[in-house]
Amino acid sequence: MENARAVSLHRSGITGDDAKTREGSEALRIDPDQFWELAAPHKQKLYNFIHKSLSFSEEADDVYQETLLRGLKYLRSYDEKKSFGTWLFAIAHNEIKKHRKRARQGDPLPLAENLVIHGEPARPDLIWEVHRYAQALKPKHKEIFFLFYDSGFSIAEISRITGVGDGNVKFILNRARNILRKLLGANHGKL
Amino acid sequence: MENYDPFDEELQKLVRGVEHEIPQGLEAKVRIAAETLLPQSKSRFLFIRRPILLASLSATAALLLVILFILPSFHGREEAPITEIRTQFELSGKNITIIFIQRPDFPALETVN
């Protein structure tokens, strides 16, 4: 009975296929089959966030898999009124933290030397510089940096995902921005 | 960001300049793992719930039985209504027995002293 209840869908008042629209709907009751549908728009961002946060470690694939499986397993705990992306990335944040605890006992995570540069950027050397800087950040700072600049979350969302206060998130981002500005010797629009 | 800084846009482009596509193999692996995970969680759920359900059913049945047995004792025993009165005479030496049966529909017997 309980399973049947979970599987049942109540989509009253929801039109269109946009997962983001459905995320915000109060009338939506999700089921495990819908998990993939809801996760689909976030998967690529999630994969890159985990990879970048774990310094492109090969084990990042395992963390990605574990994040999705955890999400599926604990789907009942997801509050439909809140953003699915924030919820999923919060799971990823926990999985990354767990992975770091395990990895701390063994060898340090390797920093990949073969970054796959997307497209044909004007200044690949700057991309390298930014990523080299990010990889040297403290784990939590690195996550916040990538959540903002890679995944595109707002400060409030990052605060919810990581559990770090808004003020601290702003402080971490400001510091990173100022250091990178100096490091790259960049002025706006001249990169 | 509350205080918009145009440099953020440039940084965003640089950070997103490194991108990894999700390997097809990984997608398939996750799907397979998910399929094995779901039936497990369902069966585990039933495994936990079934004894609870059975225990609650038997407890309810036991409670009902107790109520059925105990409830009459609270009401007290009601006296059975008299449906008939029998009066029996034996005539000595004649081996004859006369029985009067008085029922509610009979006319009332008058006792003569």
Image (cartoon, rainbow, N blue to C red):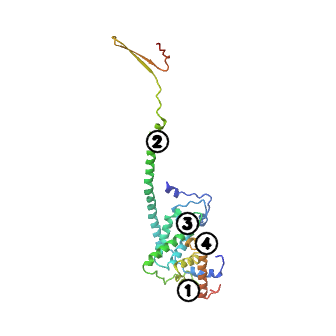
Label drawn at residue A156 = 4
Identify the chain of the residue marked 4, using the numbered disc in the image: A
Within 10 Å of the Cα at label 4, are there few (<14), some (14-19), or many (20+) other Cα atoms? some
The residue under label 1 is which amino acid type?
Glu
Task: For the residues labelled 4 and 3, say whether their Cβ atoms are less than 8 Å apart.
Answer: no
The residue under label 2 is which amino acid type?
Ile
The residue under label 4 is which amino acid type?
Ala
Same chain, labels 3 and 2: no
Extreme bottom residue here?
A185
For label 3, the residue is A38
Q: Nearer the viewer, mark 3 or mark 1?
A: 1
Q: Which of these two is toward me, A15 or A98? A: A98
Image height check: is A137 above or below A36?
Answer: below
Q: Nearer the viewer, mark 4 or mark 3?
A: 4
Same chain, labels 2 and 1: no
Identify the chain of the residue marked 3, using the numbered disc in the image: A
The residue under label 3 is which amino acid type?
Leu
For label 1, the residue is A129
Residue under the image location 44 percent in, 75 percent down: A102
Q: Secondary structure at mark 2?
A: helix
Q: Nearer the viewer, mark 4 or mark 1?
A: 4
For label 2, the residue is B67
Q: Nearer the viewer, mark 2 or mark 4?
A: 2
Q: Secondary structure at mark 4?
A: helix
- Mark 4 or mark 1, which has the lower sequence index? 1
Distance of label 3 from label 1 (alpha carbons): 34 Å
